[in-house]
Image (cartoon, rainbow, N blue to C red):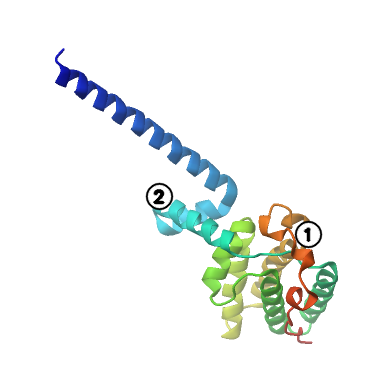
Amino acid sequence: MPVWGWALVAVAVVAVVALIAWRALAARRTRTLRARFGPEYERTTTALGDRREAEAELAARQERREQLHIRPLPAEARQRYAQQWQAAQAQFVDSPAGAIAAADGLLAAVMQQRGYPMDDFEQRAADVSVDHPAVVDNYRKAQAISLRSGRGEASTEDLRQAMQHYRSLFDELLDDAADAPLADDAGAADLPVDEREPSQPAVRS
């Protein structure tokens, strides 16, 4: 075989090896993202209609999350928020819409103290999805019902479901065990109290 023939064979071999390596990396990325995001991986893929686009979106969320300083709540803050949640839940009997508004505000206060940016709901949900992928869709559903409630379009059963949806994320945000994998949590206990505990709106009674 002439030299140019061997050169073509070598190029073909390199191309095949590169293709195999690329497919292996793509498959590994898919496995990693699917394991990390769980149901949020499927939801994002369905919403965008393209697996590669969805994976790029989820990878971008991870990169953004790494730039945030998400910190666990001090024990006293967890206790205070838990008490405020009980007050909001008790309010549901007399004022379901008021209880939902209180729960929404309380959850926002918890996320703000944890360190999540609060400028935009969709971005906030995307940030939360990295750490709490199993319940972030509950948050979206609760928010949708809350908006309908503001327009007088939600039934009492809708509001009851919203309360349950809010509670699923609230419990995870207050659960210190869920903070263990977060690299940014190290040293959070050393923050001054005024940095760890920003003021939050009181739950309406």
Identify which residue, 78 or 157, lies in the foreground: 78
Q: Position of residue 173 (x, y in %)?
A: 72, 64
Say whether disc 2 or disc 1 marks the residue closer to the N-terminus: 2
Residue that numbered label 2 is attached to: 52
Residue 8 shown left or right of residue 53 in the figure: left
Q: Amino acid at mark 1?
A: Asp
Q: Rounded to the nearest whole Å, what is the CA distance between mark 2 and mark 1? A: 34 Å
Identify which residue, 49 or 156, lies in the foreground: 49
Examine the image and state in which quarter residue 128 appears. bottom right
Residue that numbered label 1 is attached to: 176
Residue 25 shown left or right of residue 163 in the figure: left
Residue 80: in sight, yes or no?
A: yes
Of badges 2 and 1, nearer the viewer stands: 1
Identify which residue, 33 or 156, lies in the foreground: 33
Q: Position of residue 153 (x, y in %)?
A: 57, 81
Indicate the secondary structure of the residue bearing disc 1: helix
Instruction: Judge whether 27 appears above or below 86 on screen.
Output: above
